[in-house]
Image (cartoon, coloured by chain):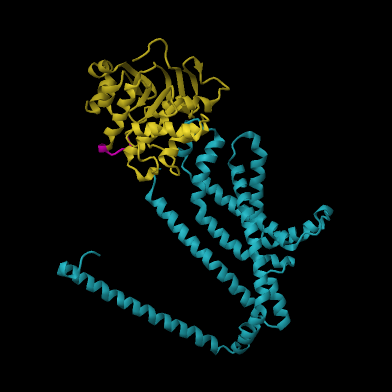
């Protein structure tokens, strides 16, 4: 915007005036419609016959304050499980993806097994995996394991399910690296595994960061499901508090905490995706 | 410069087909140390496939390939080891997009030849200086021009000190004003005695730098001769037709 108003032609000035008027008009319209919508929801909600009761049992300020410490403590457990599961999922998912791309006949069983694994765990509802792992592993009565804490079992179940998803993401990334890159690596004398490690994987990982962030966001809220195994996380903590006060507000508190936790990750994911898609569009050859 | 004692690269009865489609139909050729051989022919005549077969990137369907005295098409040879001795440069450069130009050149030096980072960097820098990109080693491929990318790709191949360099239409993907700089680099390589087999559409360039020209049509060698003679006195009707189509 180096040009000041005096140097522009009257034609351009007319265009700018027109654009400005149009923009002002749309901003006004947006404000008006937002207000109308908010008023509609607000009064609509207040007008429902049960609103009074819903307000006291879901949005009770005193209960929220009382319940907060236990729910927040629980959230810290969720966070620990999240970090551990995310780490394990990345490793397992990548390994599964690599197994599936191995060509040598020696690896036939590995290839088939990982294929079967992905099919199984992509189809199995997470809640069922949680029950099977959470009650199945202790049921084996492996003495040397001692008593495995519920959060550990929950982490295992989450890892089992999410590894299947993440391995598909990695596999798509590996396959999206153009074959000419592989060809160039092989033509220089790099072996299959070195081409994979030094050329294909580094490029694949860059490509899959945005979809991986999506899976991370999903995992972030699914860690709340470990409560079904009895781990005292934010959800279970909320359940305990809800029972104590005979009031549902603690669930709302837990829900809000999960949302607050997710917002930075979602924003970060958006920004990273944008950055990477820009770079893709700038386009290296092929 | 050419050492006529024995061929560096020798191909006998090479065939390549994909299912029923014959792409290379019995090719015999020899390239001597220090010689520059140009492969010409229409698109789809099999030039690229032939080069890929010689680098063992494509599996051949029949025939034999010898590098010096070693049969590299023999069963059980270490293909990776052979490929490291035969440089191949692609039409579309194929630089590794996640690596700087310097790292593109040092990658195979380190991981195939087992050089230390210092050794590899020294060789790569020498080549970068020679191709006029001495100060661009840290740049990524998408930040330099097509001509610079292709020169880097050639440097990546020759830095491995290959016994023979295969060039697959290395100027075809370039804007016309960038072709010259790549051809200059090949002229420069000729001076230092690099053995080159190149597929090319640049007939004027082939006439200028090549010692021997091979005309490929439908997977067969249709005519081959010393470069000057080939262009001055084409023998076969098809060669004449091709040359006149290419307006030469």
User: Residue B78 location in percent, x, y?
Assistant: 55, 25
State the cyan chain: A
Quarter of the image where the N terminus of chain B is located: top left
- Relative placement, left or right, of B184 versus A132 is left
Q: Is residue A124 above or below residue B43?
A: below
Q: Is residue B107 above or below residue B61?
A: below
Quadrant of the rendered structure where residue B212 is? top left
Residue shown at the point (59%, 70%) measured from the top left: A258
Residue, far top = B5
Quadrant of the rendered structure where residue B39 is? top left
Residue shown at the point (26%, 76%) measured from the top left: A21
- Relative placement, left or right, of B35 versus A161 is left
Front residue of A272 and A105: A272
Residue shown at the point (46%, 22%) measured from the top left: B15
Front residue of B116 and B35: B116
User: Residue A149 location in percent, x, y?
Assistant: 76, 61
Q: Colour of chain B?
A: yellow
Residue shown at the point (34%, 43%) measured from the top left: B144
Quarter of the image where the C terminus of chain B is located: top left
Q: Is residue B81 magenta?
A: no
Front residue of B220 and A77: A77
Give the main secondary structure, helix, strand or loop, of the magenta stretch: loop
* Magenta stretch in the rendered image: B172-177
Q: Is residue A223 above or below residue A194?
A: below
Quadrant of the rendered structure where residue B105 is? top left
């Amino acid at each position: 915007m180096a040009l000041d108003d005096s140097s522009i032609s009257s034609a351009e000035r007319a265009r700018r005036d027109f654009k400005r008027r149009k923009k002002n008009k749309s901003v006004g319209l947006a404000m008006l419609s937002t207000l109308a919508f908010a008023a509609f929801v607000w009064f609509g909600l207040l007008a429902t016959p049960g609103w009074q009761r819903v307000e006291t049992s879901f949005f009770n300020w005193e209960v929220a304050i009382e319940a907060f410490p236990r729910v927040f403590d629980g959230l810290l457990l969720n966070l620990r499980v999240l970090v551990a599961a995310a780490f394990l999922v990345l490793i397992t998912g990548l390994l599964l993806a690599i197994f599936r791309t191995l060509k040598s006949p020696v690896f036939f069983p590995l290839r088939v097994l990982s294929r079967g694994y992905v099919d199984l765990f992509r189809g199995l509802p997470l809640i069922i995996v949680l029950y099977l792992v959470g009650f199945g592993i202790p049921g084996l009565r492996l003495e040397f394991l001692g008593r495995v804490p519920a959060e550990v079992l929950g982490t295992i179940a989450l890892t089992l399910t999410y590894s299947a998803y993440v391995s598909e993401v990695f596999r798509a990334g590996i396959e999206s690296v153009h074959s000419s890159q592989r060809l160039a690596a092989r033509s220089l004398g790099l072996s299959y595994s070195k081409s994979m490690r030094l050329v294909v994987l580094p490029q694949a990982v860059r490509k899959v960061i945005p979809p991986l962030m999506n899976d991370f966001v999903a995992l972030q809220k699914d860690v709340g499901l470990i409560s079904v195994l009895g781990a005292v996380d934010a959800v279970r903590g909320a359940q305990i508090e809800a029972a104590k006060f005979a009031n549902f507000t603690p669930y709302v508190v837990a829900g809000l905490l999960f949302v607050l936790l997710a917002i930075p990750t979602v924003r970060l994911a958006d920004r990273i995706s944008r950055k990477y898609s820009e770079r893709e569009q700038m386009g290296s050859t092929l | 410069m050419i050492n006529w004692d024995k061929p560096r690269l020798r191909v006998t009865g090479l065939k390549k087909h994909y299912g029923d489609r014959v792409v290379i139909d019995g090719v015999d050729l020899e390239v001597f140390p220090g010689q520059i051989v140009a492969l010409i022919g229409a698109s789809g005549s099999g030039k690229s496939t032939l080069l890929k077969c010689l680098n063992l990137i494509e599996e051949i369907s029949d025939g034999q390939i010898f590098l010096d005295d070693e049969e590299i098409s023999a069963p059980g040879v270490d293909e990776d080891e052979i490929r490291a001795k035969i440089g191949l440069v692609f039409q579309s450069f194929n630089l590794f997009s996640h690596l700087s130009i310097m790292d593109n050149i040092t990658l195979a030096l380190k991981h195939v030849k087992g050089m230390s980072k210092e050794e590899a960097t020294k060789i790569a820098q020498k080549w970068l200086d020679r191709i006029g990109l001495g100060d661009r080693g840290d740049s990524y491929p998408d930040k330099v021009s097509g001509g610079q990318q292709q020169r880097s790709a050639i440097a990546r191949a020759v830095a491995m000190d290959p016994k023979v360099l295969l060039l697959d239409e290395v100027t075809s993907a370039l804007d016309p004003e960038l072709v010259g700089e790549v051809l200059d680099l090949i002229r420069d390589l000729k001076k230092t005695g690099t053995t080159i087999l190149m597929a090319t559409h640049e007939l004027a360039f082939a006439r200028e730098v090549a010692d021997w020209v091979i005309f490929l049509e439908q997977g067969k060698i249709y005519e081959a001769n010393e470069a000057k003679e080939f262009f001055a006195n084409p023998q076969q009707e098809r060669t004449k037709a091709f040359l006149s189509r290419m307006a030469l």
